[in-house]
């Protein structure tokens, strides 16, 4: 879906904000770019929709270079959510959400239906909120509007640049859960930038850790935690994610008992990035469940596989001290 090939960004004096980045984000994937401040993650994200021009290399979407797209066509197919919510204060919530659909000349009826659909999806009653101004909403509510505004014209790709970092911890945690739940429904290709490793581990199907403009390691949360490639990754993760909190970082995919897409009997399903907290109630009711990823069954989990994994990991963590 999105491919970086030897992408670099040079600024004055020869400073490289991004240096020979090679990366692929697959369709329907929730991909997280993470690293310390100034590591090049936001620059990398902004090069996708050409808010920042790349200096070397190529970025392609669906096999086509971004430079070959009409700039309006490119950006209309990419939703963009910022830390600074940037709603237009003089417009109503409905008018804010409707901006891109109106530019694409959607009918009034289609726009109205889309606004209602999206507001319901993020828990904002359209009858109550659609005619309000942004100043009449809380910070968390405004950020929800920012997310659905980015989704209004049904783009394939959603870019999110530290969208929750300015929120208080309660709203931040709620919105993290909401965006994870929303992604399970809409399956967009999401590139999410954060400096918070816990947020990255909770949300990402895969992570890419950057430092000083370069990609250091990419992989699933489980791979990053269990197999850091060097001391930088080990320290970056270790300083922010206690090894004794591994239960919070488990996903359905890491708990697979059998892999493959052949499931003989109808089974309850769970998404590959579902947390242990979501998996356990399901397996309390049913002894076995199918695990879905990108619309396909990748295997099954059972009560036995979950308990065995936890037991083995607990022993290893105890041995490490």
Image: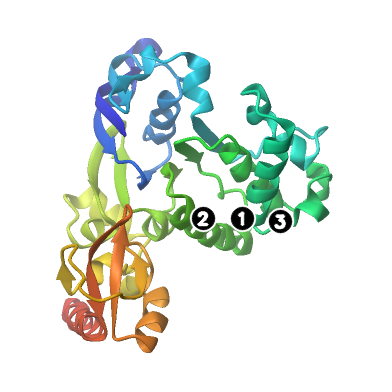
Residue under pointer 3: 124
Q: CA distance from mark 3 to mark 1?
A: 8 Å
Give the image location of residue 50, x and y in percent. 45, 20
Q: Quadrant of residue 269?
A: bottom left
Q: Are marks 1 and 2 in contact (CB under 8 Å)?
A: yes
Query: Relative to residue 116, is residue 302 depicted above or below?
Result: below
Q: CA distance from mark 1 to mark 2?
A: 7 Å
Q: Are marks 2 and 3 in contact (CB under 8 Å)?
A: no
Residue 303 in view? yes
Give the image location of residue 294, x and y in percent. 32, 52
Residue 51 in view? no
Label 2 sits on a secondary structure element that is helix
Give the image location of residue 29, x and y in percent. 35, 47
Query: Relative to residue 228, is residue 251 depicted above or below?
Result: below
| Mark sitting on residue 121 | 1
| Mark sitting on residue 306 | none
Q: Quadrant of residue 262?
A: bottom left
Left or right, residue 85 beside residue 267: right
Label 1 sits on a secondary structure element that is helix
Q: Nearer the viewer, residue 35 or 23?
A: 23
Residue at image coords 31%, 69%: 250
Around disc 3, counting alpha carbons within 10 Å, would you say few (fewer than 14), some (14 to 19), or many (20 or more)? some
Give the image location of residue 126, x and y in percent. 76, 52
Residue at image coords 63%, 48%: 118
Around disc 2, counting alpha carbons within 10 Å, would you say few (fewer than 14), some (14 to 19), or many (20 or more)? some
| Mark sitting on residue 182 | 2
Q: Are marks 3 and 1 in contact (CB under 8 Å)?
A: no
Query: Relative to residue 215, is residue 116 depicted above or below?
Result: below
Residue at image coords 61%, 23%: 104
């Amino acid at each position: 879906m999105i491919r970086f090939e030897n992408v670099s960004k040079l600024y004055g004096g020869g400073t490289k904000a991004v240096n020979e980045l090679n990366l692929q984000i697959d369709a329907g994937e929730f991909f997280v770019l993470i690293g310390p401040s100034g590591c090049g993650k936001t620059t990398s994200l902004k090069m996708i929709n050409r808010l920042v021009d790349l200096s070397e290399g190529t970025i392609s979407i669906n096999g086509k270079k971004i430079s070959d797209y009409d700039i309006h066509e490119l950006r209309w197919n990419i939703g963009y959510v910022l830390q600074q919510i940037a709603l237009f204060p003089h417009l109503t919530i409905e008018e804010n959400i409707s901006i891109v659909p109106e530019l694409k000349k959607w009918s009034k009826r289609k726009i109205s239906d889309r606004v209602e659909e999206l507001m319901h999806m993020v828990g904002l009653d359209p009858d109550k909120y659609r005619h309000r101004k942004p100043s009449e909403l809380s910070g968390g509510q405004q950020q929800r509007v920012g997310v659905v505004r980015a989704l209004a014209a049904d783009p394939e790709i959603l870019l999110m640049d530290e969208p929750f970092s300015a929120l208080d911890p309660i709203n931040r945690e709620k919105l993290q859960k909401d965006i994870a739940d929303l992604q399970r429904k809409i399956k967009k290709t999401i590139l999410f930038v954060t400096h918070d490793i816990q947020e990255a581990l909770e949300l990402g199907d895969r992570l890419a850790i950057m430092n000083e403009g370069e990609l250091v390691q990419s992989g699933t949360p489980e791979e990053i935690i269990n197999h850091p490639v060097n001391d930088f990754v080990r320290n970056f993760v270790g300083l922010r994610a206690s090894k004794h909190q591994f239960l919070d970082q488990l996903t359905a995919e890491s708990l697979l008992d059998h892999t493959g897409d052949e499931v003989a009997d109808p089974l309850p399903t769970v998404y590959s990035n579902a947390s242990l907290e979501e998996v356990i109630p399901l397996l309390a009711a049913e002894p076995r469940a199918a695990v879905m990823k990108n619309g396909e069954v990748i295997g099954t989990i059972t009560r036995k596989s979950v308990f065995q994994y936890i037991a083995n990991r607990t022993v290893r963590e105890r041995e490490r001290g």
